[in-house]
Image (cartoon, grey):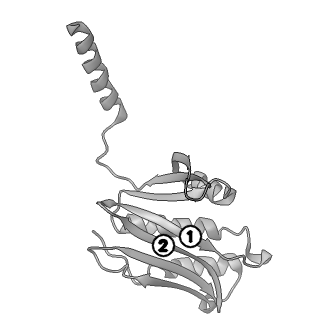
Amino acid sequence: MNKLSKNFFNKYEEQIATILDKERNTICITTEGDLYHDANFNECEITLEIGDDFIFSFTLCDMIGCCGILIYTLAKVTEYPKDIRNRGLGTLMSNMAIDIAKILGYGILIATDVTCSNIQQKIFIKQGWQERIKFVNPRTDNEVVMWEYHLGNEHEPEEEEYYEDDEDDQVEEEEDN
C-alpha cells in the first residue's frame, strides 16, 4: 500500500483559492485521524475551512472485513454564502476522496446518499460513479442510493469470459437431461 504525501492537500488548497478567488493562506484543509501511514488505516475526517468558516468535511474509512474497499461517508457542506455556491466545491471534495483512495491502493470507493440530494447525485454521475442499490431506509424512511466508484482494479475478470462460461455450463446441463 502506498503512503499519502503530507503535501497532498496543497494542490487542493491552491485549486480552492483559485475557484473562490481567496488568498491561499486563508484556505486550510485538516485531517483528523491517521491518513499518512501505510497499514491498518481505519478512519480519517477531512475538513476544509476558509479563515474561521467551516466549508465542508467528509470521512473516509475502511470497510470492515474487506481492506480493498474504502467508504466515503459523513459528507457535510455548510450553508455557505451564495457567492461561493456552484463553483465546484462538491466535485472537488469527491475528487479528493477518489484521489486519496487511489493513492492508498484501494480497489473500490463506496458511498450512500439520499435520493433527494440532486446535487450530489449529479456529481457522482458526472464523475463515473455507478448506482448500485436503491432502497428505503426503514430506520429513517429516506430513499437511499448506494454508489460505487471503481479505482482501476486490473484483476477483474472480463464479463464476456464469465458469461461464455455460464452459457457453456447451461448447454451441457440441457444435453444431459
Residue drawn at (46%, 83%), measured in percent from left and top?
Answer: 31
Relative vertical location of residue 30 with respect to residue 64 in this rendering, above or below: below
Q: CA distance from mark 2 to mark 1?
A: 7 Å
In the image, residue 24 sits, relative to residue 165, either above or below, namely below
Quadrant containing the C terminus in the rendered view: top left
Between 163 and 71, the one nearer to me in the picture: 71
Residue 106 horizontal/vertical position (percent): 35, 61
Q: Which residue is mark 1?
A: 75
Residue bearing mark 2: 59
> Foreground: 73 or 80?
73
Q: Quadrant of residue 5?
A: bottom left
Q: Position of residue 172 (x, y in %)?
A: 23, 14
Looking at the image, tell me whether mark 2 or mark 1 is earlier in sequence order.
Answer: 2
For the N terminus, the quadrant is: bottom left
Q: Image quarter for residue 18?
A: bottom right
The residue most toward the right is 82
Please name the amino acid that badge 2 sits on: Thr
**Circle on res. 17:** none
- Residue depicted at 70% across the width and 69% down the height: 87
Image position, residue 143 (x, y; %): 61, 51
User: Horizontally, is 3 left or right of 113 in the view?
Assistant: left
Q: Are marks 2 and 1 in contact (CB under 8 Å)?
A: yes
Which class describes the residues within 10 Å of circle 2: few (<14), some (14-19), or many (20+)?
some
Q: Secondary structure at mark 1?
A: strand
On the rendered structure, is 16 left or right of 174? Answer: right
Query: Looking at the picture, which amino acid does disc 1 mark?
Result: Ala
Please state which of residues 30 and 140 is positioned toward the viewer in this rendering.
Answer: 140
